[in-house]
Image (tube, grey):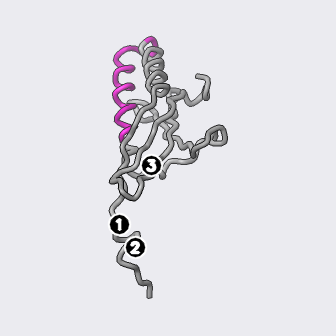
Amino acid sequence: MVQFNEASEQDSEPVHYLVEWTEPALLEADAAYLRLSQYPGPDYAILWYEGLFVVGETLSTLPRIHSVAPENEGYNVEARRLLYYGPSRRRSSQVYRLLFHIIEPQEDEAEGVVRIMHVWHGTKGPQA
């Protein structure tokens, strides 16, 4: 028989995270928007850009379900990635990687922080 303490993980509320976008991530998102507005076109670019921020906000719950990024070794924090396939949500050449790290809440804080560090095209890597 398994017994739990009063403060067991079974009783704890799930942690909520505030999603923050760094300046480099916002600049990379803007640059991708400009590229996409040329091809496939402005309508697609607007849907892509809006969807990027919707997908980013999903990191406010359960950000650890996303894998550690291959570039993790280059950071002094644990870098994770979320793959964003654009408005069609199909695997395509338009896949982008959101690299982020998680800051767990301190004992006196209600929520943690997910900081999105980069938005990179999936096939081009960090220098895209």
Task: Say what secondary structure mark 2 lies in.
Answer: loop
Q: Is residue 86 visible?
A: yes
Q: Quadrant of the C terminus?
A: top right
Give 76 or 15, whichever is nearer the viewer. Answer: 76
Give 123 or 3, whichever is nearer the viewer. Answer: 3
Q: Amino acid at mark 2?
A: Ser
Q: Are marks 2 and 3 in contact (CB under 8 Å)?
A: no
Q: Which residue in the protein does label 3 denote?
A: 63
Q: Amino acid at mark 1?
A: Ser
Mark 3 Cα shell of 10 Å, populated few (<14), some (14-19), many (≥20): many
Image x and y of residue 99, in percent? 52, 37
Q: Amino acid at mark 3?
A: Pro
Image x and y of residue 62, in percent? 41, 52
- Residue 12, label in figure: 1
At x 35%, y 59%, the residue is: 14
Q: Which residues are magenta?
A: 38-57
Q: Which residue in the protein does label 2 denote?
A: 8
Q: Are marks 2 and 1 in contact (CB under 8 Å)?
A: yes
Quadrant of residue 113 within the rendered picture: top left
